[in-house]
Image: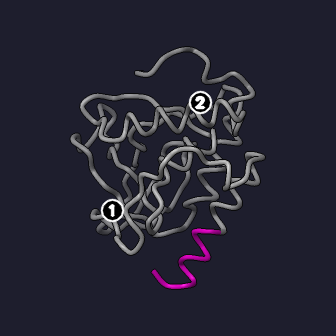
Amino acid sequence: MSTIKRLSVLSIMLFAAAMSGCTLTDQQSQPINPPTGNQPQGDQARVVSIIDGDTIDVELNGQTLRVRYIGVNTPERDEACYSEARQANSAFVREKTVILVRDTSDTDRYGRLLRYVYLDEVMVNEMLVSEGWAESVEYPPDTGYAAQFRDLEQVAARNNRGCHPTGIFNDGSTTR
C-alpha cells in the first residue's frame, strides 16, 4: 500500500477514534482485516451516497446499487445516535473507492447487495462495530465474521464508545 493510502487509512482511524473518545491503543481484540499488503478480493466500487450508518449507494459497472453492510446494525432515522452513526460511516467512505466482498448471500429481500466493505485493507463493518457506531447482528447464512464482530462489540460497550452510552444497543438481540 502506498504511503499516501496508509496515511489516509490512519487518518480515518484517528478520526473515528477521536469521535468515539477512545484511543487506538485501547483496542483489545485482534483485527480481522487482511494481513498488510493483501487487498481483499471483491468488486471495486465508488461510493456515491451515504444512506445511513450501515447502508451506502455505490457505482459499480456503470450502475448505482445499494449496499447493506453484513453483520452490523446502526440506529434508524428515528432513534438515538442515528446522525452520529451515519456521520461515522460517511467519514470512512464518502466518495471513496471501496472493495465489496460477498459472504454467502448476494442480496437481501429488499434487493440490496450484502457485502463486507473495505477501504484499502480496512473493513468498514469492523471499524463501525469497534468504534461503537454499530452493533453486531447475525443474518444467517452471512455470518463469516459474526464471532469477531461480537467480540469487538463487547469491547466497544465496555469502553462506552460511539452509540453505546445512549443504550440504543441494549435490547439483547443478536439477530434482526
Quadrant where the C terminus is found in the figure: top left
Instruction: From the image, state whether disc 1 or disc 2 is nearer to you.
Output: 2
CA distance for labels 1 and 2: 26 Å
Identify which residue is drawn at 58% across, 44% down.
28
Give the residue pinned by disc 1: 63
Magenta: main secondary structure equals helix
Few, some or many residues within 10 Å of mark 1 (<14, 14–19, 20+): few
- Could you tell whether 76 is left or right of 55 in the image? right
Q: Is residue 126 magenta?
A: no
User: Which of disc 2 and disc 1 is earlier in sequence?
Assistant: 1
* Identity, as a three-letter code, of the amino acid under mark 2: Glu
Mark 1: secondary structure: strand
Identify which residue is drawn at 63% across, 39% down.
132
Identify which residue is drawn at 45% across, 80% down.
1
Name the foreground residue: 11 vs 150: 150
Q: Which residues are magenta?
A: 1-10
Task: Indicate the position of residue 162 as horizontal and vertical percent values.
Answer: 69, 39
* Identity, as a three-letter code, of the amino acid under mark 1: Gln
| Vertical side of 175 occupied by 63: above or below | below
**Quarter-of-image position of residue 18:** bottom right
| Vertical side of 92 occupied by 38: above or below | below
Name the foreground residue: 23 vs 28: 28
**Quarter-of-image position of residue 79:** top right
Task: Indicate the position of residue 119 as horizontal and vertical percent values.
Answer: 47, 64
Identify which residue is drawn at 37% across, 28% down.
138
Residue at the extreme bottom of the image, as rendered: 3
